[in-house]
């Protein structure tokens, strides 16, 4: 009796970032977009024929795939969809990383990569970022079972150009290379331009509607790649769950992609606020990386990040602090609205005043 | 170069049932509910503050868990949520079936069980249904690494009572037992009554909002089990994708569960139509199993199932035919509205007339 307990999967659960339910907080800890989704996406939800939810969604979600394909200038056969980009990445790890050689990614990066390696028993090797928290492309010449590069990287916020990506691709003709572009819309050119080329049919670019498109609540992720990679990803998905993207997400996601004007406006606003936030923090004695994302990564010359984090929390301003090697004196701060950033900056000024 | 192709996951894709886009068909092939979701669920979508979709959903989806817990008379710690019950089952297979012994399930059953075994490399052994397509509980006394029993079974439509379930549980104190209740609301008592007992803390009951709750387009599945089983399932889920159920699904799902009156009415209507459909098909020379689901499983004394299937398809009436051992002379027909069933029966009568 109770022998079944021996067969339970032993796994240390990943703990998602703090998601406070409080209403009157300034929430700059989850890299959410401070602006609402496109009014056209909202209209698509409101006007959706909700009675038809009795039917399954189309399992190919062709409408949303076509909109994404058009936006990136690739074919519909180059697009894959999932329930958020975590779903897409988890499926891609299972689909492409079946080698005995370790997959390669930076030591400081998205915390889910090692979780998936553990979950799917994929060997992995991390390569340290340099002293400026940059990825050294030469590290990725070493033989590997796959490469995952986030661009921009998180939580460092640092983005790299197309030349850097092409180097990674040149060095890795024998591995699948995943470029995780969760934050790319805020400041780097997409590697999607390499997708349609016959040369790099081992490239998978992943993206999400949770950041630049303000649809974190809807769970929409996607991948772009050669028809061969996408078909393997589809086969793995169809061996798992055929209908991962629901009907309302397909409708709202399509309307969002088609509204290029609103998309551009929101990104411009966030970049403008990001520049101001960066400048003001530097004036206050912070070292701030040049961000290509919707968050900034900073450390103060005098005050400990953990103390600032705790102080801000007590003032109901939530930012992200990681108690991890190399970055335990840094803060990751989401670029909110100008009003939210004013509150943040005022609280930081108070902290400095109180402690000087 | 191209060595990466060796590391792609080789997998035979599962092919979902035919989902025609045509508008003027009678679609009785996907076991969808012919009635719309609860008006309260629709209202929950229409009145949802869509601007707040910029935020991530609460990863614990406590509101929906609480509603399901109340409906089944269990605690909130006994409830797990996923992106449809396929997601829940796929995670459960990974969480609980880590034994070298084969897991046990019927030879004729939901076609995804062997797909997940292949996907997650879980050994499995099937036990043949008897001549009346019933599951013999004595088969499940054999040592195993886990048990999966759908109740009612699909595509046979046959449900079993609480005594049967308790036998399975009694025989399997050393394995996790999954009772897949995708169709249970249409005619069997839920095994949820065993969930809160200390005795059967190895029981997981799974369910879906896609059938009885007319929300197939929303992708909501759930599981009920002991706090220990649920916590392992949560850990595996959180190592995969923290936010599987989106904000609108949480809102619509909660409203659906709270509308017990509408739920009861829809089920009554489907059971009434199912009885009529069964009776009329028997009059026309079919053998029809007594169904506990929202579909019926039948075979004709004279005419081949495949021929009837093809004929109906040519008349734009879609039912399900499986070209599989033992059941290749059977049809699975979803219980639609009375109007849809009238069209179906008339076409079958025409077929019999033309071929007699």
Image (cartoon, coloured by chain):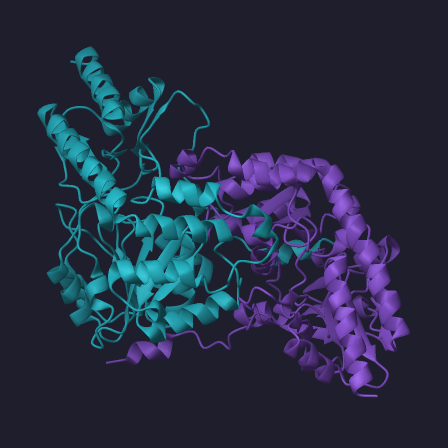
Chain colours: A purple, B cyan
Q: Quadrant of residue A187?
A: bottom right
Could you say where residue A348 lies in the image, as x and y percent from the top left? 78, 76
Could you say where residue B184 lies in the image, as x and y percent from the top left? 23, 50
Q: Quadrant of residue B262?
A: top left
Q: Residue at x 42, y 34 (%)?
A: A52
> Is residue B167 at all visible to an observer of this figure?
yes
Q: Which residue is drawn at 80% across and 74% down?
A: A298
Could you say where residue B274 lies in the image, as x and y percent from the top left? 18, 34
* Quarter placement of the C terminus of chain B: top left
* Position of B293 relative to A177 (above/below): above
* Quarter placement of the N terminus of chain B: bottom right
Compared across the picture, whether B352 is left or right of A101 comes to left
Compared across the picture, whether B98 is left or right of B283 comes to right
- Of A286 and B200, the residue lying toward us: A286
> Is residue A151 at all visible to an observer of this figure?
no
- Of B330 and A300, the residue lying toward us: A300
Count of labels in the image: 0
Q: State the residue lying farthest toward the bottom.
A: A356
Compared across the picture, whether B300 is left or right of A17 comes to left
Q: State the residue lying farthest toward the top.
A: B354
Q: Which residue is drawn at 79% across and 70% down?
A: A345
* Position of B269 relative to B154 (above/below): above
* Position of B328 relative to A111 (above/below): above
């Amino acid at each position: 009796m109770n022998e079944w307990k021996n067969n339970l999967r032993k796994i240390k659960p990943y703990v998602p970032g703090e998601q406070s339910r409080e209403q009157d907080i300034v929430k700059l800890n989850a890299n959410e977009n401070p602006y609402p989704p496109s009014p056209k996406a909202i209209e698509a939800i409101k006007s959706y024929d909700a009675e038809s939810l009795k039917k399954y969604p189309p399992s190919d979600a062709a409408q949303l795939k076509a909109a994404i394909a058009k936006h990136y200038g690739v074919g519909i056969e180059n697009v894959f969809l999932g329930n958020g980009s975590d779903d897409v990445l988890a499926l891609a790890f299972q689909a492409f990383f079946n080698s005995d050689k370790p997959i390669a990614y930076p030591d400081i990066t998205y915390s889910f990569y090692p979780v998936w390696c553990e979950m799917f028993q994929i060997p992995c090797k991390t390569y340290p970022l340099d002293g400026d928290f940059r990825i050294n492309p030469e590290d990725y010449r070493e033989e590997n079972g796959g490469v995952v590069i986030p661009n921009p990287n998180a939580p460092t916020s640092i983005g790299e150009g197309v030349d850097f990506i092409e180097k990674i691709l040149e060095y890795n003709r024998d591995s699948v290379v995943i470029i995780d572009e969760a934050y790319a819309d805020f400041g780097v050119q997409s590697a999607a331009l390499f997708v349609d080329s016959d040369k790099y049919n081992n490239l998978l670019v992943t993206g999400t509607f949770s950041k630049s498109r303000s649809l974190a609540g809807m769970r929409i992720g996607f991948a772009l790649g050669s028809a061969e990679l996408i078909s393997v990803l589809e086969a793995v998905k169809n061996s798992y769950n055929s209908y991962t993207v629901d009907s309302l997400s397909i409708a709202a996601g399509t309307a969002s992609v088609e509204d290029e004007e609103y998309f551009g406006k929101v990104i411009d606003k966030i970049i403008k606020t990001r520049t101001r936030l960066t400048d003001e923090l530097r004036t206050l004695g912070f070292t701030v990386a040049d961000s290509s994302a919707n968050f900034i990564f900073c450390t103060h010359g005098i005050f400990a990040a953990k103390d600032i984090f705790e102080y801000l929390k007590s003032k109901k301003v939530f930012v992200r602090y990681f108690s991890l090697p190399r970055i335990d004196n840094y803060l990751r701060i989401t670029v909110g609205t100008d009003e939210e950033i004013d509150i943040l900056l005022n609280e930081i000024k108070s902290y400095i005043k109180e402690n000087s």
